[in-house]
Image: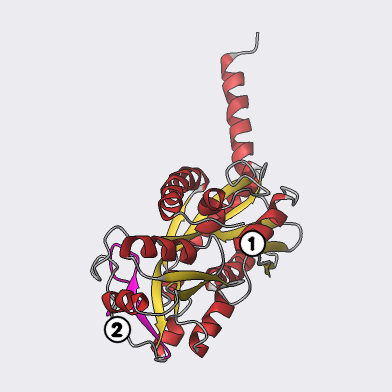
Amino acid sequence: MIPRRWLLAGLSTLSRAALAQPAWQPERPIRLVVPFPAGGPTDLVARPLAQRLSDVLGQPVVVDNRGGAGGNLGAEQVVRAAPDGHTLLLSNVGVLAVNQSLYRSLPFDPERDFTPIALVAGAPVALVVNAAVPVRTVVEFVAWTQVQAAPVPYGTAGPGTPGHLAGEVFRTLTGAKLQHLPYRGSAPALQDLVAGHVPAMFDPVQSPLGQIAAGRLRALAVSAPVRSPALPATPTMREAGVANHEMVAWWAVVGPAGLPRPVIARLADEIRRISDNASWRDGLAQLGISPLFMSSGELATFRRAETTKWGAAVRASGATAE
């Protein structure tokens, strides 16, 4: 029989060896897929995150914009990638919690086909109008839409995005005479809004912030429990007279199904460190974005709760997408 002290010594040695194992290290550049065109609100989170991850992982983290179908096309590419940590998805609430209720069919299952890694950030959706639109409050905007000859188009980053659903819920709650006008991303929608080709837009607050500051756009309200630090003079929807309209967009990093635990642990740990960094937090705050770190397990629970919440909003609004 093996002496007990030898057995305990052996187990202790094994434990120390396990703890001493090096963390997962990428072997080549990492592709961080953003399922929307360049220049939109997701890019404002993705690009600084990619740079900081590049610095700590020792390999380039390259943002790859793959827009289309409300984010579904880019997400499908990640689903089909090898689960080795070299292809990741930074996506918003639309792909991960809204689209399965909004679309009649999806080429993937958001829960089964992705490995949650970490929640990164969140921001409220803002209702903004071109500065030439003759309204300054939400009440005035609703009244203005109701006297137009045809429904007023509002731009969004595409079907299934937070802006789309926020717009449909707003229309249902207020009776505003609106019609959804989807674009292939926030950037082209914002361009048309600034040019006056579309009078209004719903989008996460960081996307139109620069044009608001320049006076080309006017923010009427944000869909959050409290005012955005980036737009302190802009009321919340509740303050503007629209109760039950809290639509906070969020962004998370996920990978293909079957991602190994060491990969998840390393990536989540690095994102947590980034989230704790004061310069990262200050940089996001200037854009109206809040760091919202959650670990893999926490993100999985959060995503399921958000799917229930946003799914109820989809059904209540009657919004659908092909």
Q: Position of residue 225 (x, y in %)?
A: 29, 62
Q: Mark 2 points at which residue?
A: 136
Question: Which secondary structure, mark 1?
Answer: helix
Q: Give the residue displayed 51% in from the left and 53% down from the top.
A: 98
Left or right side of 166 for 25? right
Q: Quadrant of the N terminus?
A: top right
Q: In which quarter of the image is the C terminus?
A: bottom right
Q: Estimate how packed mark 1 is, as few (under 14), some (14 to 19) or many (20 or more) residues with alpha carbons within 10 Å.
A: many
Q: Position of residue 255 (x, y in %)?
A: 64, 51
Residue placed furthest toward the front? 149
Q: Position of residue 286 (x, y in %)?
A: 40, 77
Amino acid residing under circle 2: Arg
The disc placed on residue 69 is: 1
Q: Does the magenta stretch include residue 220?
A: yes
Residue 167 visible? The answer is yes
Q: In the figure, 128 relative to 8: above or below? A: below
Q: In the figure, 310 relative to 144: above or below? A: above
Question: Which secondary structure, mark 2?
Answer: loop
The chief SS type of the magenta part is loop
Q: Give the residue displayed 59% in from the left and 41% down from the top.
A: 19
Q: Which of 172 and 12 is in front in this view?
A: 172
Left or right side of 61 for 120? left
Amino acid residing under circle 1: Ala
Give me the C-alpha separation between circle 1 and circle 2.
33 Å
Q: What stretch is highlighted in magenta?
A: 216-233
Mark 1 or mark 2: whose residue is earlier in sequence: 1
Q: Where is residue 182 in the image (x, y as percent from the top left)?
A: 56, 70
Residue placed furthest toward the top? 1
